[in-house]
Image: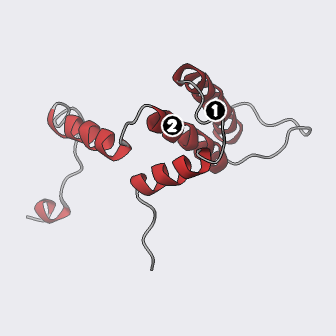
Amino acid sequence: MPEGKSIKDLQTEVDTYIGQFKEGYFSPLAMVARLTEELGELAREVNHYYGEKPKKSSETEKAIEEELGDLLFVIICLANSLDIDLEQAHDYVMNKFNTRDKDRWTRIENKDEESK
């Protein structure tokens, strides 16, 4: 079974795609505005599937997966334009959760310990 793409692979793939165009990346502020737009589209889809607002019959079907993909693409564009390594950013955040927030949530008991 082949392994999936790493975050670095995703960043390289997006950079190669954007590198084909003279315009290059949008400004960071424009990308944050685009992130907001994409997040709104994701929220709308989640609301249609899990909330109290069903789609109108005239609305096209979009999947939550597609909206998450759009959001991920813009996040990668923003990171690339600012020369941010998302793997390092992820590692930083996970370290924060595993240290500062390590006792914040109730852990699931280990099944081996429960049987003792």
In x, y percent, where is residue 34?
62, 27
Q: Secondary structure at mark 1?
A: helix
Say which residue appears at 58% left-offset and 46% top-offset: 19
Q: Residues within 10 Å of mark 1 (few under 14, many from 20)?
A: many
Q: Residue at x 58, y 29 (%)?
A: 35
User: Mark 1, mark 2: which one is toward the viewer?
Assistant: 2
Residue at the far front: name it. Answer: 22
What's the residue at 65%, 34% (across, down)? 23
Cα–Cα span, label 1 and label 2: 10 Å
Residue 27 appears at what percent x and percent y? Answer: 56, 24
- Which one is nearer the viewer's eye here, 29 or 2? 29
Q: Residue furthest right?
A: 58
Question: Which quadrant of the figure has residue 93?
Answer: top left
| Amino acid type shown at disc 2 | Ile
Q: Which residue is mark 1?
A: 38
Front position in the image: 21 or 90:
21
Q: Amino acid at mark 1?
A: Glu
Q: Quadrant of residue 102?
A: top left
Judge left or right: residue 102 versus residue 66: left
On residue 66, the disc is: none
Closer to the camera in the image, 87 or 82:
82
| Residue lying furthest left | 116
Q: Nearer the viewer, residue 77 or 2?
A: 77
Q: Position of residue 33 (x, y in %)?
A: 60, 22
The quadrant in which the N terminus is found is bottom left
Dot 1 or dot 2: first in sequence order is 1
Q: As drawn, is 36 to the left or to the right of 95?
A: right
- Label annotation for residue 75: 2
1 up-or-down from 43: above or below: below
User: Which quadrant of the view contains residue 29?
Assistant: top right
Q: Is residue 54 left or right of residue 29?
A: right
> Label 2's element?
helix
